[in-house]
């Protein structure tokens, strides 16, 4: 701990805890998938872990099942980054995945005109937070 600058300790930032964090969000089955009687192949047997099929397990910082709302994702992954941004730190949120996996919905970069507040994604929530803090 002696080699960690005091300002880093004072802000509660410790090496290895505030670098890159990875979250996985499972989307609900589409109406087409439900009509075809498809079943989800994902399970989350313990916090931070996702199992595909029967034996392919992967561990992440956050695993969100299909029932989590937009606000839950924002509060868990993004809210603290906005606060650190105002302390002078850089922050990046990146959505990655195949077509139709829910990136646009999660980020909220589609039109947010006439969208219920509960459905607002990360970007509109970040903008709202920034303007409420200045």
Image (spheres, grey):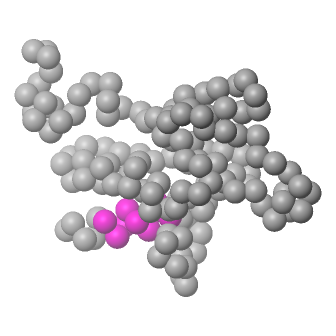
Position of residue 30 relative to residue 58, above or below, is below
| Residue 37 as seen in the image, left or right of residue 84 | right
Q: Residue 38 in the image: x percent, y percent?
A: 86, 51
Image quarter hosting the N terminus? top left
| Image-quadrant location for residue 49 | top right
Q: Main secondary structure of the magenta part?
A: helix
Furthest-bottom residue in this view? 114
Furthest-right residue in this view? 36
Q: Residue 41 in the image: x percent, y percent?
A: 76, 40
Queried whether the magenta region covers residue 55, the answer comes back as no
Give the residues drawn in magenta, as a range: 121-129
Q: Residue 124 in the image: x percent, y percent?
A: 44, 68
Which residue occupies 61% across, 38% down?
44
Position of residue 49 relative to residue 102, above or below, is above
Position of residue 69 relative to residue 63, above or below, is below
| Residue 65 as seen in the image, left or right of residue 55 | left
| Image-quadrant location for residue 9 | top left
Which residue occupies 81% across, 65% down?
31
| Residue 131 as seen in the image, left or right of residue 95 | left
Which residue occupies 46% across, 35% down?
61
Position of residue 91 relative to residue 122, above or below, is above
Q: Is residue 12 visible?
A: yes
Closer to the camera in the image, 28 or 14: 28
């Amino acid at each position: 701990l002696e080699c960690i600058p005091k300002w880093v300790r004072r802000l509660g930032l410790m090496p290895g805890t505030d670098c890159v964090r990875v979250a996985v969000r499972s989307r609900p089955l589409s109406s087409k998938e439900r009509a075809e009687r498809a079943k989800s192949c994902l399970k989350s047997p313990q916090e931070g872990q996702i199992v595909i099929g029967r034996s392919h397990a992967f561990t992440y910082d956050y695993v969100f099942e299909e029932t989590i709302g937009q606000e839950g994702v924002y509060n868990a992954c993004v809210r603290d980054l906005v606060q650190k941004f105002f302390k002078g730190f850089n922050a990046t949120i990146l959505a990655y995945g195949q077509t139709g996996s829910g990136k646009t919905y999660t980020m909220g970069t589609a039109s947010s005109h006439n969208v219920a507040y509960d459905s607002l994604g990360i970007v509109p929530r970040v903008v709202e937070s920034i303007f409420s803090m200045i």
